[in-house]
Every structure is written in C-alpha cells, then in structure tokens.
Image: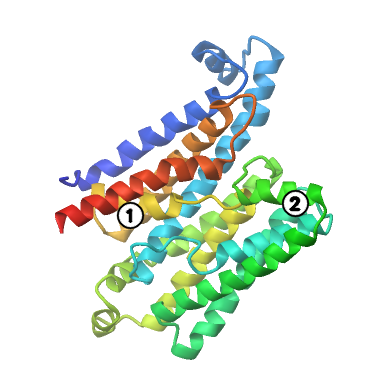
Amino acid sequence: MKPLSPHSWLPLLTIAVLAAFGFALWAGSLPLSAGDLYSVLLGEPATPTHATVVLKIRLPRALLAALVGAALGASGGAFQAVLRNPLADPYILGVSGGAALGAVAALTAGFTAALFVPLAAFGGALGALALVYWVAQAHRGSPHTLILSGVMVGSLASALLLFLLWTAPADPVRAAVFWLAGNLAMVDPAWLPWAALWAGLAFLFLWSQSRQLDLFTLGEETAADLGLSVGRARLCVFVAAGALTAAAVALAGLVGFVGLTVPHVVRLLWGPSHRRLLPASALLGAAFLMTADALSRSLLAPAEIPVGVVTALLGAPFFLYLLRRREGEA
C-alpha cells in the first residue's frame, strides 16, 4: 500500500475524530434520531430525557474514551520506538499488572468510591514502572532488560492479583473483573479536566522528544554516534509514556490493542516520523476508542459489553492482517 500524502493526516484524522464523536453521542440503548441529537446540541431538546442522556451520560463518556484512546495510541508509538520492538504496547513494561493490582486491592478492601479505584490503579502503575526501571538499571536500562523486567514485574503482579481475587468475597470480585475487562463507566466526570491536564503535559513532553525517538529507530549505536544521550533519552521517554499509560489505565481499566495497533496503522499510512506519528496516533486512538465504546453500549443494548472486549475483537484480527501482510511483502 502506497503511503498517503504526509500533509493529509491532520484533516483526515480530524474528520475521523468528529465522526466518532458524533457516533458516540448518538449510539446507545435510548434511540435517538440525528434530529434529536442536533436539537440537544443546539440547546433545544425534544424532551429532558434526551438532554440528560446526551449531555450527562454520553458526552462525558465520549470525552473519556477520546482521552484514554489518545493516551494509549501515543504511548504505544513511543514505546515501540524506544524499545525497537514493533510488538511493544503500553502494557509491556508491567503497567497493566501494577495498575490491576492497585485497583483490585482497593476494590477487595472495600474502597469502592469513584475516587479510590483510579487513584489506586494509578499508584500501582507508577509503582510497577519504578520497579521495572530500578531492576533494569543494573544493565543500564537496555531494551531487552526493560522488557524482561516488565514481564517479571507483570507476572508478580498477576500472581498477587489472583491471590486477592481468590480470597475476596463475590461482590468485589465481580467489580474487579468488570474493571479488568475495560470499563469507562466507573469514573466521575469531574476527574476529566485533571486527567486531561496530566495527559496533555505528558504528551507535550513526549512530543518534544520526537527527534530522539527517530534516532532510536536507527539503533542505539548509530543514535549515540549522532549525539544522542541514549540512557537519558530513554528515561525521559519511559517516564512520559509510562505516565500517559498509567493515566489511561487508571481511568478505563485494561483496554487492549489500542496502543499496539494504532501506531502501526499510522506508520503504514503516513510514515515513521514521530513528530507526525505521535499526534496522529493520539487522534486515531481517540477515534478508535470512541467508536469501540459506542459499539459496546449499543450492540447488545440495554446490556453493555466491556469496551476492552470490543477493542480486542476489532484490533486483534486487524493486527493479524498487518502481520500477515508484512510477512507476504518480506
């Protein structure tokens, strides 16, 4: 497939985000026509129920999905560059295990308020990242050591997680399983501005490292010869991408395949330059997760499918197609 014009990414992805946002406001268990939605957005809803559903329920959830999808898309692109591993995703360094352990520990301890679960997940994710980097520093934080440390920390967290689930009462276990499958319904909308500020600052810092990420893709020796301080640059990217991932997991639970698949699509369409790839991955990740969440609420309405299940059903076959296509081209 021939790449698109490098200048086409912003208009095309802006259209995709707006279309996904409109679909997320329209889709759900309450039937709405396009005219109903348009009336609500103009401030002239046909019924108070329409206004409540769109503005109080669907709008905050669409914004949350956009934020989480953007964070996972951008952090996935950064991790794939700094680890020089096309199969790297935001959860490869034990972030998912640490966040899951923190969230489930809060749930099984009885802290079910909207405040405690995201905070516990965020703390667990940052704790796992710190442990991974501390272990990997013994080998100067090489990519292979980081990945192995992440796998080990994730395995340890999974073992502790299983112990908590095995010994917990039934109600906390159900809540924990729902969170682990990916869930955008457990966060207080009041958290959105603070989460957006945190994610925005982390993304801007990560974007400022675009040239360094381009150099990483050339190999560490070549990057060092070109003047890159490899260890310092890796730490900067590690912290920024890890902070983005931690925020996403704290808000939505474990939502897979966004950070793995989206950067591959962007590279395929618009090339590998990270100054373009990072914002493009953020926009495409936002559009993808808003669409997946809308489908999760509408496919079996009034029942709801965990959004992590929908992203896996959409992302896994597409990623297998990408791998098969690359193998055929090789």
Q: Which residue is mark 2?
A: 173
Of circles 1 and 2, the one toward us is 2
User: What is the count of numbered marks?
Assistant: 2
Kindly give the residue lying farthest to the top in the view shown: 46
Question: For the residue carrying disc 2, how many other residues have a C-alpha within 10 Å: few (<14), some (14-19), or many (20+)?
Answer: some
Q: Nearer the viewer, residue 28 or 228?
A: 28
Residue 118 figure quarter? bottom right
Q: Position of residue 114 (x, y in %)?
A: 76, 48
* Residue in the image at 53% along x and 12% along y: 33
Q: How far apart in space, not on screen, are marks 1 and 2 (Cα)?
A: 39 Å
Q: Position of residue 41 (x, y in %)?
A: 56, 21
The answer to which of marks 1 and 2 sits earlier in the sequence is 2
Question: In the picture, which quadrant includes the C terminus?
Answer: bottom left
Q: Nearer the viewer, residue 301 or 186?
A: 301
Q: Position of residue 55 (x, y in %)?
A: 64, 27
Left or right placement of residue 166 versus residue 91 in this view:
right
Q: Amino acid at mark 2?
A: Val
Residue 283 in sight from this viewpoint: no
Kindly give the residue lying farthest to the front in the view shown: 166
Does residue 306 sit above or below 277 in this rendering? above
* Residue in the image at 45% along x and 41% along y: 313
Q: Position of residue 269 (x, y in %)?
A: 25, 47
Left or right placement of residue 62 versus residue 327 in this view:
right
* Residue in the image at 48% along x and 61% along y: 90
Assign a secondary structure to mark 1: helix
Does residue 114 sit above or below 206 in this rendering? above
Q: Amino acid at mark 1?
A: Leu
Residue 277 figure quarter? bottom left
Q: Which residue is mark 1?
A: 277
